[in-house]
Amino acid sequence: MLVLVTTVILYVFGFVFLYGVIRLGVRHGLEDAEAHRPEVLRRAQLVSAQDRDFARENAFLTHDN
């Protein structure tokens, strides 16, 4: 009976530990995503501006006939 109780306790603590590790990993992942968001937005705006400039300078490539 002691073995069964010990097994159940370790089993439950294992799931609690696993839950904590996963939660910590998700939290750090979300923090990294939030930290890099301004950089990604700046890159997207830069690429968009470059595309607009290219299209403006080379209108003959984008003109529909």
Image (spheres, grey):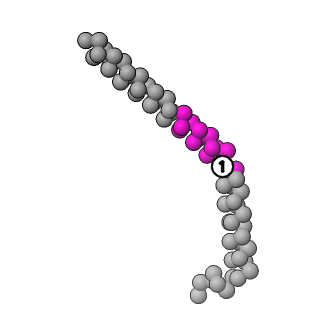
Where in the figure is residue 9, as x and y percent of width and height?
36, 18
Location of residue 42 with respect to 3 vertically, above or below: below
Looking at the image, which residue is at 58% across and 41% down? 30
Location of residue 52 with respect to 35 vertically, above or below: below
Residue 4 vs residue 34, the one in the foreground: 4
Determine if the magenta segment contains residue 29.
yes
Location of residue 44 with respect to 16 vertically, above or below: below
Q: Quadrant of the C terminus?
A: bottom right
What is the number of callouts on the image? 1
Give the quarter of the image for residue 1. top left
Looking at the image, which residue is at 71% across and 76% down? 54
Where in the figure is residue 63, as x and y percent of width and height?
63, 83
Residue 7 appears left or right of 13: left
Residue 27 vs residue 65, the one in the foreground: 27
Read off the residue under disc 1.
37
Residue 33 vs residue 13, the one in the foreground: 13
Q: Amino acid at mark 1?
A: Arg
Determine if the magenta segment contains residue 34.
yes
Q: Considering the whole magenta stretch, tell me its main secondary structure.
A: helix
Where in the figure is residue 23, as x and y percent of width and height?
51, 33
Looking at the image, which residue is at 66% across and 55% down? 40
Location of residue 2 with respect to 28 vertically, above or below: above
Residue 64 appears left or right of 19: right
Q: Single out the residue that lies furthest toward the top.
A: 1
Q: Secondary structure at mark 1?
A: helix
Q: Single out the residue that lies furthest toward the front.
A: 3
Numbered range of the magenta stretch: 24-38
Label 1 Cα neighbours within 10 Å, binned few <14 / some 14-19 / many ≥20: few
Looking at the image, which residue is at 64% across and 84% down? 61
Where in the figure is residue 64, as x and y percent of width and height?
59, 84
